[in-house]
Image (cartoon, helix red, strand yellow):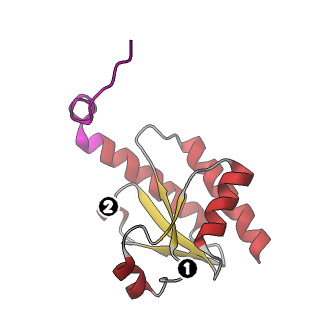
Amino acid sequence: EIYTLSYTTLFRSIGTEAIIKKERSLIKRLEDQIRDLQNIHLYGNPDSSQRVGILSFNMGDEDSAYVADWLFEEEEIAVRSGAHCAPLMHETLGTKMQGAVRISVSHKNTEEEIDRTAKAIKKLSQLLE
């Protein structure tokens, strides 16, 4: 028998604030580890208390699809790339052709997974220098 827990039940049992706090903490941990890379460009509100569990970035002029494919093929880290159904945002950011890499976390992700992701991004950053 398959049991599916609805999001409403999940949020009520854990608590929305606890979920948001965990996701923000994980994204901040990732951002803190990669923000100083030479060729990284982070997008979004720099105030982590105003963000959700998503981090968008680019690596230099590299196509976002290449970065996403490399992370998956070499490190088995699944991210998304492209315009994310937000072409006007990409026009504003100047990333219309490049898109962006988007990492989304869940309250079920671990700090170890975040650290492994940061390590992979650092590795790719060095390869692209």
From this view, report whether residue 55 is shown above or below residue 8.
below
Q: Residue furthest top?
A: 1
What residue do we see at 60% from left, 65% from top? 34
Q: Dot 2, crowdedness within 10 Å: few (<14), some or many (≥20)?
A: few
- How many numbered marks appear? 2
Q: Is residue 100 left or right of residue 71?
A: left
Nearest the viewer among 75 and 4 is: 4
* Image spot of residue 26 (x, y percent): 46, 50
* Image spot of residue 86 (x, y percent): 36, 73
**Can you identify the residue that label 2 sits on?**
49
Q: Is residue 73 left or right of residue 33?
A: right
Q: Quadrant of the N terminus?
A: top left
Q: Please tell me whether residue 6 belongs to the stretch shown in magenta.
A: yes
* Image spot of residue 98 (x, y percent): 55, 79
Nearest the viewer among 22 and 73 is: 73
Q: Quadrant of the C terminus?
A: bottom right
Highlighted range, magenta: 1-18
From this view, report whether residue 24 is shown above or below residue 68.
above
Q: Which of the numbered marks, if any, corresponds to residue 98?
A: 1
What residue do we see at 51% from left, 55% from top? 29
* Image spot of residue 66 (x, y percent): 66, 68
Looking at the picture, which amino acid does disc 2 mark? Ser
Alpha-carbon span between mark 2 and mark 1 = 28 Å
Q: Please tell me whether residue 106 belongs to the stretch shown in magenta.
A: no
Looking at the picture, which amino acid does disc 1 mark? Gln
